[in-house]
Image: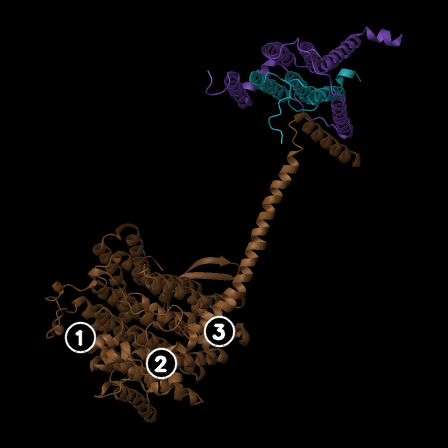
Amino acid sequence: MNFLSGLFTPQGVASAAFVLVMAITILGALIAVAARNIFHNVLGLALSLMGVAGLFLYLNSPFVALMEILIYVGAICIAICFAIMLSEPLYLPKPPRNRLKMLGAVAGAGLTFVFLCLLIRKTQWTPAVERSTDWSITTLGHYLLTNYALIFEVISLLLLVAMLGSIVIARGGRGSS
Amino acid sequence: MGSCDPVLLGCLLTVFLPLSAFALIMIFTWRYHKLSMAISLVASTIPLLIAWYFFFTLDVKQPIIYNFNWLVSDQVKVPFGFLLDPTSVLMFVIVATISWLVQIYSIGYMGGDPGFGRYYADLSLFALAMLGLVISSGLLQLYIFWELVGLASYLLIGFWYEKFSASEAGKKAFVVTRFGDIGFFMGLVFLTLYFGSLDIATVNSAALTAKMPPWLITTSALLIFCGIMGKSAQFPIHVWLPDAMEGPTPVSALLHSATMVAAGVFLLTRLFPLFAASATAMSVVLVISTITLLLSSTIGMVATDIKQVWAYSTVSQLGFMAMGLSAAGLAAGTLFPGYYHLTTHAAFKALLFLCSGVFIHHFGTNDFFVMATQGGRKLLIPMATITIAALALAGIFPFAGFFSKEAILGALAHLPNKMWLVLGLFGAFLTAYYAFRVIFVMLFPKEKYDKYHLETDPHAHAPAHSHGHGPGPGFTHDDAHIHPDAKPGHEHDESGHGAGHGHDEPHGVPWVMSFPLLVLAGFTLILGFCQGSLEKYLLGESAPHHIEYGLLVSAVSCAFGGIALAWFDWGRRGAKCVGFISYVPVLENFFIQKWYMDHFWRWFLNTFIYGIFSRAFTYNDRRVVDGGVDAVAFSTVGSGRLLSFIQTAFLQYNLLFMVLVLAGVGIYLLMGR
Amino acid sequence: MLLFNQLETYLYLAIVLFAIGLYGVLARRSLIALLISVELILNAASINFMAFNRFLAPHPAVGQIITLFIMAVAAAEAAIALSIIVALYRKLKTINIEQATELRG
């Protein structure tokens, strides 16, 4: 009963919600890689990204969480949908999966997982001695336009170049009309 | 040491004027003959003035040294700079004067040659190299200019490169002198390694003997002497010098008699204290130079090409100078006799060549028998001056050669072993003989030369006097330069030099050609009487002269004996016109074949260089080097082929292995912690 | 200690996401699926940044800005990748990377 009564405190609710968010994230990720239908993959990705946005909320940054939904779910997933529609038709029969390849992929991913787990376990995490507590969006915007203005500009340039590049490539390259 | 120091400025001008003249002519003006000539003349006249100015006004008792560090590596410093002391200033004057006179002379001699501009560019290059060599302050700098001199010599010998023998002779000169320069360079390396300085003043100082053991001094001195042997054409690598006569005659006068070949002897003088520190080295020098003297004198006795005679004479006189220097080194003497002979020799030998140049130019042949029968003696100025020069060469009073030979013989007389003196006297005798063989043939031409020379061979068993004898790159009797417009035109007649009047020949001697002759003849006459002052200039004090009359008499009698024999053989009415040496046919043939030195080197080349080294190197090149390169190439291609099987174009497998290895390594490292 | 107040929770979640993404990259054949997997990997990195920002960093804005940067890069990358996919499909009539084997040795 202790567990149940604990569930209805504010912290209990928050914890339960957090577990839910984690579950959504991992489930979405699994759907994103495991489903055979490519549209299901995209939807799984969207689900997972929503979960990640929830995580960001838990990490005290609602702005980034909103941006996550805006950019990833709103822009990238939609772009992927467009690409799916522009490329291969979905009704074509899919070749059977290659067991060996999947086994190798599982091994590679698992080994990396073990490696990273060990890395986390063996590292001594030490917080910074003096920490600011100002988490407001105002401060973030202020920094983005003063100290980190370069990042802002580089992002702009990068997006511009990517835009131009994707147009050029998708049109079929130089010379074709 | 400010930039306004006039002496330094003079040195810099001396080096950079000819350099810029060379560059200017080669790049821009070589098509315009007159302009090129003017540039080159300006660039040689100014050093001439500087040289004489230095000679007369500069007090160099205390050497003036300008040193700039060019290369500093730990304890080894390689300075670049100028060293002005009596030795270098005197040589500076000689080089500047002779090269100026030769440039003047060449206006006439080379006039109309299609390569006129190139010729003057090469002369400027030579002037740069030689002047830089003379006044350089460090041995490495000297070595660099030394090689530049070799380059200029190569360019000038092979000036008429369309002629096969000329280009061959150029190559031969270059390669043979390089052969000696290897030794020179190794000597420099020795000095650097064990002494740590290539500064001439330091090398010559007493610090050397304190710092290096005697055997090392001997080794490095002998190695440096290898370079001297190459450049000054000492036995056994003298073979390039006679062939070098393929170049234009003014070049022979400038490079191969008066200045460039004297660079070797100059270096010997320059490093006289170093050589004097090792008696062994000096003895070797003495032996080599004596052999050179006798060998080349005997060959000079039988040569029929006038330039060949003077070439061998040059070789022998260089040997004589080296003899004088080494004898002085052995008997605690001074460098004066050898250096004095260098000075006088520069004057009279340049004179001999330039006179011969006039004859060659005039008659279109190198053979003095032909010149004689065609009336060579009618060219008054050259004939008079060549006789003066020959008298000087033979060592007859009052000409310069008399005094300098006397000085060298005096140095030889100081040696405990009198054999050297006797050999020196014998050399002087032979010198007088072969010099006057030419003079008497030219002066008193006989009808029978033609027969003797062109068709009959008095000695059936000796293939003597036939042209083109001997193997290898011998000289040819072709006209030294075959170009239609090289003859002095008639328009020169009116401007012929005043002293040249009165001959009936339609061709005069242009004044630009006779002027240097007269100047040099003047030098030949007066240099002898400058002995005392020159000695004072060189050594600081004039040693008291006690004339050894016995020596004097024997020397003069040797010279007169040689002349008399020449008169008996060639000059007198009814002379047999065969050299006394013809009575010993074996010897004569031996001399005509140049002591078989060309054969020897040809054999040496064929057997050792081509037969062993070349073949081994070729084999090495084909099998090891080429094979190695091929092996690398093939193995690269092969392994690329092999590896390309891994490249399946399945990116995900590549990525999988990458991830596996990365994670594996990461886990391994973390588990170890 | 609450679950969502611990650094390790986020880190483990991030590596789970990373491993899933890696599996997708290694196993899937469709180029679009590969792109989706890469997005997952990028998100794992973003989570890490945000977590470090929340628990360790002296200054709370840095990690957020980096995360924004990653998003922008991901967007650019997605745009380029998608255009490449479209171009490739036009050329090869497939987006299966096992059939794009023109560089086979």
Instruction: Kindly indicate whether the residue at mark 3 contacts the one at mark 1 (C-beta within 8 angstroms).
Output: no
Label 2 to label 1: alpha-carbon separation? 27 Å
Circle 3/circle 2 CB separation < 8 Å = no
Q: Which chain did the renderer colour purple?
A: A
Label 2 environment density (alpha carbons within 10 Å; few <14, some 14–19, many ≥20): many
Quarter of the figure with residue B327: bottom left
Q: Which chain is depicted cyan? A: C
* Dot 2 amino acid type: Ser
Label located before the other in sequence (1 or 3): 3
Is residue B425 left or right of A140 when viewed as pictured?
Answer: left
Q: Is residue B162 above or below residue B641?
A: below
Q: Which mark is residue B186?
A: none
Chain letter belonging to callout 1 = B
The residue closer to the viewer here, B550 or B362, is B362
The residue that label 1 is drawn on is: B381
Can residue B603 be seen here?
yes
Instruction: Say which label, 3 or 2, has the lower sequence index.
Output: 3
Find residue A9 and report its image quarter: top right
Amino acid at circle 1 = Ile
Residue drawn where x is 31% and y is 80% of the image: B457
Q: Residues within 10 Å of mark 1 (few under 14, many from 20)?
A: many
Q: Nearer the viewer, mark 2 or mark 1?
A: 2
Disc 3 chain ID: B
CA separation in Å, label 3 and label 2: 25 Å
Horizontally, is B327 left or right of A120 in the view? left
Please name the residue that numbered disc 2 is placed on.
B297
Q: Is residue B532 visible?
A: no
Label 2 chain ID? B
Residue furthest out toward the bottom: B550
Q: Position of residue B192 (x, y in %)?
A: 51, 65
Chain coloured brown in this rendering: B
> Which residue is denoted by mark 3 in the rendering?
B222
